[in-house]
Amino acid sequence: MTIVVILLMIAAFVFGPGLWVRRVLERYSLPADRYSGTGAQLARHLLDKHGLNDVAVEKTPEGDHYDPEAKAVRLTEDKFDSRSLTAITVAAHEVGHALQDHQGYAPLKIRSQLVRASRNVERLGAGVLLVSPFIGALTRAPGLGVLMFGAGMLTLGTTTLIHLATLPTEFDASFGRALPMLDEHRILKSVDRPHARRLLRAAALTYVAASLMSLLNIARWWAILRR
């Protein structure tokens, strides 16, 4: 019974945030014509209002994000072309990141550097996991294999740790930048403001929710290596 409870708690920890984020974003994606402008148009409007004329607004299939290297706010098709509350709120959140970049917000720079570094670390971790059982068998030193396996597990969880550590950057983009912009320019319908706050919280948790799902890779590797 205890094991079942533990498994349920782990499942809630890994899947819960992602399911909540998806539910919130989907809930306010209808009606799709609630506002007069699309997510892309609002992003362009807010960027221009803050003198960020050189920041592009682009459509992407890879998830809503701001690219500090390309200087581009990128929105998925359902946000780029939609006039829903979800579309304009997520667009404002990404513009919040662009504003952070423009103002030299140090935590954003640190987060960007850590994310770039984590890609190499994750690739290294996958390689370590692959070779660890063979190294242990060839050297007849099981402890070495266990040590390498542990190192691989740690590197696979790096992205999750980075997003958890830099979560304040996401909340600043939502509540320190996006919500004040939406209020200042009177974008939101008054009845929508509480819902926009919920959406901005979901936008801030998007990366964390996705990276928690990546922890399933650790379970997958564990299952493979135990065979």
Image: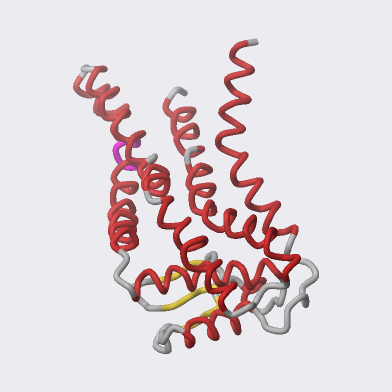
For the image shown, how many numbered marks are present on the structure?
A: 0
| Residue at image coords 47%, 63% | 176
Which residue is located at x 58 percent, y 80 percent?
A: 185
The answer to whether residue 129 is magenta is yes
First to last magenta residue range: 126-130
Q: Relative to 23, is 18 on the left or the right?
A: left
Q: Quadrant of residue 39?
A: bottom right
Expressed as whole percent of the image width and height from the top left, the position of residue 92 reads 55, 71
Q: In the picture, residue 4 is in which quadrant?
A: top right
Front-most of 182 and 67? 182
**Closest to the observer: 200 or 38?**
200
Q: Determine if the magenta segment contains residue 5.
A: no
Q: Is residue 117 above or below residue 141?
A: below
Q: Is 133 left or right of 53, judged from the image as shown? A: left
Residue 15, by quadrant, is: top right
Which of the two residues, 205 or 122, is positioned nearer the viewer here? 205
Q: Is residue 4 left or right of residue 177?
A: right
Residue at the farthest top position: 1
Closer-to-camera residue (202/181):
181
In the rendered image, the vertical position of residue 144 relative to residue 36, given as above or below: above
Position in image of residue 184 (x %, y %): 56, 76
Residue located 62% across and 39% down the image: 16
Tell me the colour scheme of the image: secondary structure
> Is residue 22 placed above or below 9 in the rendered structure?
below
Most distant residue in the right direction: 31
**Left or right, 210 with reference to 153:** right
Q: Which quarter shows the N terminus? A: top right
Q: Position of residue 139 (x, y in %)?
A: 19, 22
Q: Main secondary structure of the magenta part?
A: helix
